[in-house]
Amino acid sequence: MAKSVNKVILVGNVGQDPEVKYTPSGVPVARVSLATNERFKDGNDQWQDRTEWHSIVAWQRLAEIVGEYVRKGTKLYIEGKLQTTSWQDRQSGEKKYRTEIVARDLVLLGSRENGQNAAAQAAGHGSDTEPAPAVVDDDIPF
């Protein structure tokens, strides 16, 4: 079977403060919603804006970083994978599904004035010696 790829890259703004919880064994997990925006011309040659909301989940050290540095309105670069989970609804018995992005890496794209950017980059990229360069709008090819 050929190799497959499950990779998601998003750049967007956080819609609300993240929620950080801990599993019974003490593993941190953070959930946050991320909005991406698209601008396009419709059939009448008028500009339209479309916002897509993404559910992001981060585990372990990345979850702690999200809880410490990310707030509503924060601009983030997220790399991760798509994951769909299912469960049985207790009231209706209906099978429900949720698709979310499991974050593997993140970079805060805000200003460096508040000191968050370098700390989150270093921790998110797993580098203790040199933070990864920030991605700026001019670097994104779309």
Image (tube, rainbow, N blue to C red):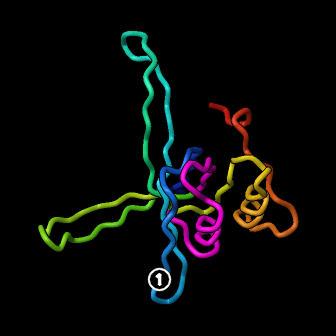
**Above or below 59: residue 81:** above
Q: Quadrant of residue 96?
A: bottom left
Q: Residue furthest right?
A: 129
The disc labelled 1 sits on which kind of residue? Thr
Please provide percent x and percent y for residue 115.
78, 57
Judged left or right of residue 138, residue 56 is left
Please provide percent x and percent y for residue 84.
38, 62
Q: How many marks?
A: 1
**Above or below 137: residue 26:** below
- Badge 1 density bin: few <14, some 14–19, many ≥20, Cα 10 Å: few
Give me the residue at 12% from left, 67% from top: 92
Looking at the picture, tell me which residue is in the foreground, 139 or 110.
110
Q: Residue furthest bottom?
A: 25
Give me the residue at 59% from left, 76% from top: 60
Secondary structure category for the residue under label 1: loop
* The magenta stretch spans residue 70: yes
On the image, numbered disc 1 is attached to which residue? 23
* The magenta stretch spans residue 100: no
Q: Quadrant of residue 88?
A: bottom left
Q: Residue furthest front?
A: 114
Q: Quadrant of residue 48?
A: top left
Please provide percent x and percent y for residue 71.
58, 57
Give me the residue at 86% from left, 61% from top: 130
Q: Residue furthest top?
A: 44
**Magenta extent:** 57-79
Judged left or right of residue 69, residue 39 is left
Please provide percent x and percent y for residue 125.
73, 63
Give me the residue at 36% from left, 13% from top: 43
Q: Image quadrant for the C terminus?
A: top right
Judged left or right of residue 45, residue 28 is right
